[in-house]
């Protein structure tokens, strides 16, 4: 709190806060290229920013944060860039194992994790065990994540439940389907932020973002400091959300 006390002035009252913030952390490569550095260094700078922003979200009382760290399409990048990103993930997982218990955050990894190298899956399993005992902010790190893959995998799990007699297709509706997604019972993101200037979703949280407020900024991810997040949250608080109705739907107090 001490660190960020001043910036909190522009933050809205708690009832206007987004409960769940999603971020497409884009612009690492361009940030590095602008400085004449290899793209890999942009990813290291981006990882630092993620640490700072996730900690800040915990301090200001955001309930859930979901970040896009690596997409199902990002495997199509040069092998050394992909390996660099996986190594940063290894480092982050090792550090988190040491520090997580003290922070009380619930760290989760969402995506097609089976396709990740075995050592990474083992590290994730260790973190899952620690996170299961925590009660603070939920931080979803989306790796080998695709919104379409999320839906397809949910359909497969649902079909398996139908075959096992645990679900009834005649009773399927949106509320019954949502828990099969990687995000499970989490509320949908209220605010979806994309850094790096592009105005597209790039296959992130397709189902879950149906009514998210979309915030696009030219700021490249490694430069997205907590003060920038404050701006996005203040902008969110000024939106009138209607969810298809004629009048604004105010958040429940
Ligand atoms: C986002 O930054 C990180 C990942 C996709 C892994 P980029 O690497 O896409 O950065 P730009 O968009 O090329 O600048
Ligand atoms: C989206 O960024 C994926 C992540 C931020 C992890 P990309 O850089 O991969 O998206 P496109 O290629 O510009 O759509
Ligand atoms: Mg990009």
Image: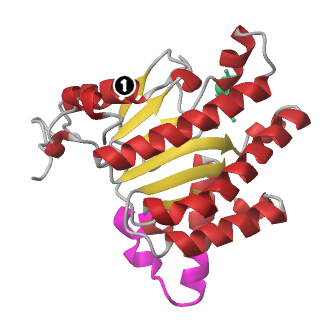
Please give left or right for residue 148 compared with residue 228 in the image.
right
Where 209 falls versus 188 (above or below)? Answer: above
Secondary structure state at the residue bearing disc 1: helix
Where 50 falls versus 200 (above or below)? Answer: below
What residue is drawn where x is 12% and y is 52%? 252
User: How many numbered discs?
Assistant: 1
Q: Magenta stretch: dominant SS?
A: helix
Where 161 falls versus 91 (above or below)? Answer: below
Where 64 falls versus 69 (above or below)? Answer: below
Residue 234 pos. (x, y %): 24, 28
- Give the quarter the ligand 2 occupies: top right
What residue is drawn where x is 72% and y is 10%? 35
Q: Is residue 181 visible?
A: no
Residue range highlighted in magenta: 159-178
What residue is drawn where x is 65% and y is 71%? 126
Q: Quadrant of the N terminus?
A: top left
Residue 3 pos. (x, y %): 36, 35
Disc 1: which residue:
227
Front-most of 4 and 126? 4
């Amino acid at each position: 709190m001490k660190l960020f006390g001043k910036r909190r002035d522009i933050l809205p009252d708690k009832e206007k806060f987004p409960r769940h913030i999603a971020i497409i952390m884009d612009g690492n490569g361009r940030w590095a290229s602008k400085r004449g550095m290899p793209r890999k260094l942009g990813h290291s700078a981006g990882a630092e920013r993620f640490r700072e922003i996730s900690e800040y979200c915990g301090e200001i009382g955001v309930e859930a944060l979901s970040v896009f760290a690596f997409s199902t399409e990002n495997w199509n990048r040069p092998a050394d860039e992909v390996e660099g990103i996986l190594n940063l993930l290894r480092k982050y997982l090792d550090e988190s194992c040491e520090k997580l218990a003290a922070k009380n955050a619930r760290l989760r990894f969402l995506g097609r994790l089976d396709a990740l190298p075995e050592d990474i899956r083992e590290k994730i399993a260790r973190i899952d065990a620690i996170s299961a005992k925590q009660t603070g902010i939920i931080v979803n790190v989306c790796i080998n994540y695709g919104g379409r893959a999320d839906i397809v995998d949910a359909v497969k799990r649902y079909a398996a439940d139908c075959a096992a007699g645990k679900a009834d297709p005649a009773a399927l509706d949106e509320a019954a389907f949502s828990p099969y997604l990687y995000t499970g019972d989490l509320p949908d993101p209220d605010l979806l932020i994309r850094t790096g200037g592009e105005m597209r979703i790039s296959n992130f949280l397709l189902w879950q973002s149906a009514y998210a407020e979309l915030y696009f900024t030219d700021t490249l991810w490694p430069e997205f400091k907590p003060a920038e997040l404050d701006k996005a949250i203040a902008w969110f608080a000024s939106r009138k959300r209607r969810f298809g109705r004629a009048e604004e739907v105010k958040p429940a107090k």
